[in-house]
Image (cartoon, helix red, strand yellow):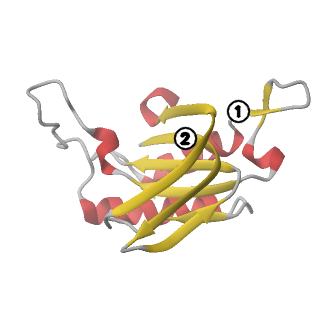
Amino acid sequence: MRMLIQRVRRASVEVENRTVGKINRGFLVLVGFNKEDTEALLPKMVDKCLNLRIFEDEQGKMNLSLLDFKGELLIVSQFTLYANCKKGRRPSFDNSMPPIEAERLYALTLEQFHRSGVKVESGVFAARMNVSLVNDGPVTIMIDSDELN
């Protein structure tokens, strides 16, 4: 499982010219699943995301988490996080989880984030989405479940 976390001043996602998710200061989290992933990964990954200390404190140091500061979350599924570009010019997505399984894990991931008590908005699984954001910093961090074990 991979989460690409972008610290944002604001972010939104549209499907068919309709805003389906919108947040103010917080994280835009792009989530992708590997075909080997299981739901056992979810608590650890969600906890890591929520507790990443990448917001500035009064001294300007990255020392506060999303929970400390009561930020907001916009969660968007993105299977392309597992693109393999080693051969040729067209990415392979063989390592991405098949859609039916990925949709189930995505729904469970959203449930885990909702339990945190912060505002959670989301995209629509497998829809063509337009994502807009103002990256704050910019700060962009990748969390990979392979690196947490």
The image shows residue 71, relative to residue 85, as above or below, that is below
* Amino acid at dot 2: Ile
Q: Residue furthest right?
A: 58
**Residue 42 seen from this side:** yes
What x and y, as percent, mark residue 93?
A: 19, 43
Q: In front: 60, or 126?
A: 60
What x and y, as percent, mark residue 31?
A: 44, 49
The image shows residue 86, relative to residue 55, as above or below, that is above
Query: Where does label 1 land, which residue?
Result: 54
User: Which label sits on residue 5?
Assistant: 2
Report the residue at 27% width, 51% height from top. 97
Compared across the picture, whether 69 is left or right of 5 comes to: right
Compared across the picture, whether 55 is left or right of 10 comes to: right
Report the residue at 67% width, 46% height from top. 50
Callout 2 crowding tier (Cα within 10 Å): few <14, some 14–19, many ≥20:
many
How many numbered discs?
Answer: 2
Q: Quadrant of residue 68?
A: top right
